[in-house]
C-alpha cells in the first residue's frame, strides 16, 4: 500500500483534534486528521449535548485568555457555518457549604472565580444567598451562607456541533480526514514521524496527538504514569416545574461539601426538552478505555438524585430520562498537558484536559496551528508544560 505523506498529522478528532485540524487547514497546511471512530461520536470525552463555558476560570489564570479567544472563535464559526454553537445564557457558580470545598483540584472555587473576574475585568455580579434564591428559584435550597458568582458572558457550547463544524470546514479547506482508522504506533525518523494505522503507513513531519483517554496507551512513558482515565456519568432528570427554569436560565456549578464529589453542575433545558442535564465528578477510581463501563445503572441514578439534587435544586423529579458515560483524562494537578513528547521531538501531546477542556479547545487548536506555521503562538501555553512533573519525565537511558 502506498505511503501517505503530510506535513502534519493530527491523531484524534474530538474537541482538541477537530479544532487543530481546522486551524491548520485554514493556514494552508498539508494536514491529515485520523480518528478511530467517526467524530462527532459518543465514545470519548466530547459528547452529551452541552459543555459549560465561563470567562473567569477558577482553575487558574493561564486559562482566562484561552476561553476568551475560544468564545470569539465559536462566534466566527457560527457566522461561517450558520450552526448554533455557543448559547450565552450566563453561568452561576455557587458555594453552599458549611465546610471548605474543592473543584478540579482548586479549593474555594467560587472565591477563586470571583477573584479572577475582578483581576481580568470580567463582567459579573457577586450574589448572597437571598439574591441567589430570588433571582434563581431553582436554587432556593442554598444555605444562608451561600455565595454566588453570576457571569452573563458564560453559558454553554454544543460539543458535537463544534466538532462537526470544524471538521467540515477543515475538509473544505483541503484537510484529509481518515475515520475508522486507529493509529497504533508512532516512530520517530530523521525527518519526522511514521504512523502505523490499521495496516497503512502515514508519514508526517509533525504529529499532534489529541487522543483523549487513549493518549497514554498510544504515547507510553511518561504519560502512562501521569494520566488517569476517570469514568463520569451524565444524567438528564425530568422537571416537575419547567417554569422554574425560564429562558434564559444559566448553566451552574454548585459546590456543597468538602470533596470534588460534593459538587454538581448542570444546564438549563434545551429547546423542546423537559429535563435538565446534571452531573457530578468522580476521581476516586481509574479505569481504561477498554474496561470503561458505559452503562449507568438505576442505582447510580437514584444515588445521584439523593446526593446531588435533594435539598440542592428545586423543581426536579427523580426520573432520569436519559444517561450517558463520558471520561475525564486527568493529570496529577488537574491542569492540562500541552507539550512536546519528551522522547519524540516531532510529536506534540494535547489531550489531557482533566475534565475542563472543551471551553478552551477552539483557542488551543488555533495556538497549536500558529506554533506549526509561525513557530510561536499568540497565546501562552507554557503553563501546560510537562516540566512541572520532573519526577515522571526522566530521560531515556
Ligand atoms: C462528562 C463530561 C463533562 C464535561 N464538562 C465540561 C464542561 O462543562 N466544560 C468544559 O470546558 N469541558 C468539559 N469537559 C471536558 C471536555 O469535554 C474535554 O476536555 C474535551 O472534550 C476532551 O477533548 P479531547 O479532544 O481531548 O478528547 P476526545 O474528544 O475524546 O477526542 C479524542 C479522539 O481521539 C480519537 N482517538 C483516540 N485514540 C486514537 C488512535 N490511537 N487513533 C486514532 N484516533 C484515536 C478518539 O476516537 C476521539 O475521537 C467534560 C468532559 C466530560 C467527560
Image: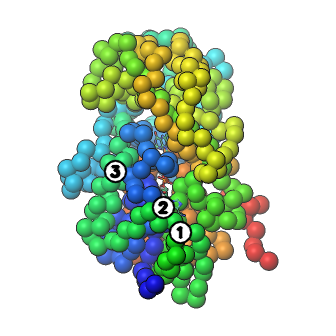
User: Disc number at residue 183?
Assistant: 1
Which residue lies most toward the right here? 397
Which of the image's four quarters has the C terminus? bottom right
Looking at this view, name the residue that lies furthest to the bottom.
190
Quadrant in the picture for residue 317: top left
Which residue is at 39% across, 74% downward? Answer: 31
Dots 1 and 2: beta carbons under 8 Å?
A: yes
| Label 3 CA crowd tier, 10 Å (few <14, some 14–19, many 20+) | many
Question: Crowding at label 1, few (<14), some or many (≥20) Cα neighbours within 10 Å?
Answer: many
**Mark 1 residue CB less than 8 A from any atom of ligand 1:** yes
Comparing 111 with 231, the one in front is: 231
Q: CA separation, marks 3 and 1?
A: 24 Å
Q: Is mark 3 within 8 Å of ligand 1?
A: no
Q: Which mark is residue 162?
A: 3
Residue at 56 percent of width and 72 percent of height? 347
Q: Quick check: is the Cβ at mark 2 less than 8 Å away from ligand 1?
A: yes
Amino acid at each position: 500500500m502506498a505511503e501517505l505523506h503530510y506535513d502534519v498529522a493530527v491523531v484524534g478528532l474530538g474537541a482538541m483534534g477537530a479544532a487543530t485540524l481546522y486551524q491548520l487547514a485554514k493556514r494552508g497546511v498539508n494536514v491529515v486528521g485520523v480518528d478511530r471512530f467517526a467524530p462527532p461520536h459518543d465514545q470519548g470525552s466530547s459528547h452529551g449535548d452541552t459543555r459549560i463555558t465561563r470567562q473567569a476560570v477558577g482553575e487558574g489564570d493561564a486559562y482566562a485568555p484561552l476561553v476568551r479567544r475560544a468564545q470569539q472563535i465559536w462566534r466566527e464559526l457560527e457566522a461561517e457555518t450558520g450552526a448554533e454553537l455557543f448559547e450565552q445564557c450566563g453561568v452561576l457558580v455557587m458555594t453552599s457549604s458549611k465546610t471548605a470545598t474543592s473543584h478540579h483540584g482548586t479549593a474555594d472555587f467560587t472565591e477563586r472565580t470571583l477573584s479572577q473576574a475582578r483581576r481580568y475585568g470580567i463582567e459579573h455580579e457577586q450574589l448572597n444567598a437571598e439574591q441567589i434564591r430570588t433571582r434563581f428559584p431553582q436554587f432556593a435550597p442554598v444555605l444562608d451562607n451561600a455565595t454566588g458568582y453570576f457571569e452573563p458572558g458564560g453559558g454553554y457550547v454544543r460539543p458535537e456541533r463544534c466538532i462537526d463544524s470544524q471538521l467540515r470546514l477543515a475538509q473544505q479547506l483541503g484537510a484529509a480526514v481518515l475515520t475508522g482508522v486507529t493509529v497504533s504506533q508512532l516512530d520517530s525518523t530523521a525527518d519526522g514521524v511514521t504512523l502505523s494505522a490499521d495496516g497503512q503507513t502515514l508519514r508526517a513531519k509533525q504529529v499532534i496527538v489529541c487522543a483523549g483517554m487513549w493518549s497514554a496507551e498510544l504515547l507510553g512513558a511518561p504519560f502512562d504514569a501521569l494520566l488517569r482515565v476517570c469514568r463520569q456519568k451524565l444524567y438528564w432528570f425530568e422537571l416537575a416545574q419547567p417554569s422554574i427554569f425560564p429562558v434564559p436560565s444559566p448553566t451552574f456549578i454548585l459546590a456543597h461539601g468538602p470533596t470534588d464529589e460534593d459538587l454538581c453542575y448542570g444546564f438549563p433545558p434545551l429547546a423542546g426538552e423537559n429535563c435538565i442535564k446534571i452531573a457530578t465528578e468522580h476521581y476516586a477510581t481509574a479505569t481504561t478505555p477498554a474496561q470503561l463501563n458505559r452503562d449507568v445503572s438505576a442505582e447510580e441514578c437514584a444515588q445521584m438524585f439523593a446526593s446531588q439534587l435533594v435539598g440542592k435544586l428545586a423543581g426536579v423529579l427523580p426520573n432520569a430520562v436519559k444517561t450517558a458515560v463520558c471520561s475525564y483524562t486527568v493529570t496529577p494537578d488537574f491542569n492540562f498537558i500541552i507539550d512536546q513528547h519528551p522522547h519524540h521531538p516531532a510529536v506534540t501531546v494535547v489531550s489531557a484536559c482533566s475534565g475542563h477542556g472543551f471551553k478552551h479547545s477552539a483557542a488551543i487548536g488555533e495556538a497549536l496551528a500558529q506554533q506549526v506555521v509561525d513557530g510561536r503562538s499568540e497565546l501562552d501555553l507554557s503553563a501546560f508544560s510537562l516540566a512541572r512533573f520532573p519526577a515522571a519525565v526522566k530521560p531515556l537511558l
